Amino acid sequence: MARLEEYRDIIGPQLLEELEMLAQRLQGKTMLHVNSTAVGGGVAEILNRLVPLCNDLGLKTRWEVIKGGEDFFAVTKKFHNALHGDAQIILPKDYQVYEETVDRNLSEMSLEADVFLIHDLQPAALIKRRSKDSRWMWRCHIDLSHPQKEVWDFLRPYIEKYDACVFSAPQFSQKLTIPQVLIPPSIDPLSDKNRELEESEVSKILDRLNIPTDKPLVTQISRFDRLKDPLGVIEAFQGIRPYFEARLLLVGGSAADDPEGAQVYQEVVERAKGDESILVLSLPPTSHLEINAIQRASTIILQKSLKEGFGLTVTEALWKGKPVIASAVGGISQQIIHKHSGILVHSIEGTTYWIQRLLQKPEFAKKLGENGREHVRNNFLLTRHLRDYLLLFLFAQTREDEFIRL
Amino acid sequence: MPLSWVRAKEPFRFFSRLSLTIITGKKVKNVRELLDEIKQAPDGVIYQHTHRFLQEYQYWIHEPPNDFSIWVSQALKNETLGEKLSAIDTVRYRSLQDLRQALVTTLEKYFKQGGQDREALEGEEFSLLQTVRFSLPTTYQAQDLLEFRDILKKISLSSLYLHVFEARLRPPLGKDDFSHWLEGELEEKGLAKQMAKLNPYTQTLEGLRQEILAMLDRRIAEFHG
């Protein structure tokens, strides 16, 4: 796992120093993160990297995972979908399963810490055993703007016992009686998905995946999901011909465990049939290096989602200095300023137009990519995420809401 | 007189400005509601929507922006009012209260002159955010011009931003920390005057650092010459 010192060349010595100075203000404090899984998913991915960095800074930080049976995770999956606004049938027994599992964890888990960061809804009710002197923060990683009322009514009293809660974008938040803090997610520049790659390494990977590079690659990397509008991407791409020669690459995750994903994948393959300029590729979820190489080999990256969370695939592409054309939805508009750090679109026609423009104006495309990379460097790297968490803990300690002298 | 003889009684202590953003949960959908909120919002809200941009886009030379003007132009399609709001020179004001008043005056004048209001589409409302500012002392302090120059090469851009621009919002002085110290402690009136004229919208913060370093180098060369 990367040590803090390894980020020096990427973020500069000054920011590293700031992190160390902030950590000094928290020396002696113990911290505990709790989430629902140790592997898989974005939260575990971030914690795997963030927790060692906190310890590197001298902050005693632990990470616990809430334990539950199949019934518990089936219930929390329903709750998760309900909070996302996807109506679910909730039975009284579901609440009981949730409460009993949390209670069992409370009796088994070591909850010794000064500062708690509880991630998402599965462990949210652990707050019922909070001690007076500790500080508890709830980190919500999902869009909570349109929750199913009965589930939110059940969870809300727990959430309002926290000192503060954290959202990734202002539009994902809820009206609450506790402070709500905005902390966007981040990418790790040293992970396999984002680290620098030699050109030879990129070529080798593309050869292995049978991706020709004889024409400019226009790429969308997203799971095969209708909300990512893969058919719209094909239509937009086909609109650039006969004026431009390029290749469209649609890359998605394995669809084996997702029946709808498998169906969308088939629809995409069907639509692309007979068009030799379109490649559809399904990769296993562990293909981080492959994704990295594909992004680096691409001329333009698309993210034509109809709905989006924060859109970390956009962050990843921007970090690689690529010109990105993306829909102005979800957290994407936090990342792209139109015609400055990328292109924001609202339609298939607009996407076609901008693919043409960027192929035609490589210097402009290059400038967009450079600005995008600097914007990510300043705002969406893991070290910024770490700094925000340290500031959050200091905020929760002082409870001042305007100005804090450290 | 050798430069090393000019020592400040009070060293310049460098601080860093860090911030956390609070989601207030308040949203406005037209200019009238925006005006009401600007009148009563905490200072941190005014700060957030007039200064955030400069910190998030440190690498970019851009127009003096504020989120209010961008929203009025883009979401309300009121480009005339948006232009007037964007013409408010953020770094000219000596307190957040003065800056707030400038925004209020512009919006009130718009209505007095018969300006029309319209509502933003659903989902395009303006979300009011608030900055919590943290002042973090660094380990650096300077007592003369040479030390000051050497440290300036090392400090973070957020520290530079704090001392050059945000300091101007701090009553009662309303001036940047560098020129205040250079004039008061080292009697460097010429340098202080040049420093006070610096504008964040003509270059990046890194470019600004280089400009200040060049000013200091010239002054140091004069001494040695």
Image (cartoon, rainbow, N blue to C red):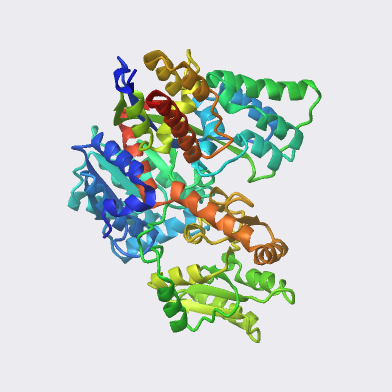
Q: Position of residue B84 (x, y in %)?
A: 71, 29
Q: Residue at x 49, y 57 (%)?
A: A315
Query: From what the image shows, is residue A163 above or below residue A204?
Result: above
Q: Is residue B75 visible?
A: no
Q: Quadrant of residue A287?
A: bottom left
In the image, A324: left or right of A283? Answer: right
Nearer to me, A298 or A188: A298
Query: From what the image shows, is residue B161 above or below residue A354?
Result: above
Q: Position of residue B101 (x, y in %)?
A: 61, 19
Q: Quadrant of residue A14?
A: top left
In the image, A2: left or right of A301? Answer: left
In the image, B129: left or right of A328? Answer: left
Nearer to me, A140 or A75: A140
Q: Position of residue B180 (x, y in %)?
A: 44, 17
Circle count:
0
Q: Quadrant of residue A263?
A: bottom right
Query: From what the image shows, is residue B196 above or below residue B207?
Result: above
Q: Residue at x 38, y 17 (%)?
A: B186
Q: Residue at x 67, y 57 (%)?
A: A346
Which residue sits furthest front? B225
Nearer to me, A253 or A134: A253
Q: Position of residue A46 (x, y in %)?
A: 35, 56
Query: From what the image shows, is residue A386 above or below residue A163?
Result: below
Q: Residue at x 61, y 35 (%)?
A: B65
Quadrant where the C terminus of chain A is found in the figure: top left
Which residue sits furthest bottom? A274
Quadrant where the N terminus of chain A is found in the figure: bottom left
Q: Is residue A382 visible?
A: yes
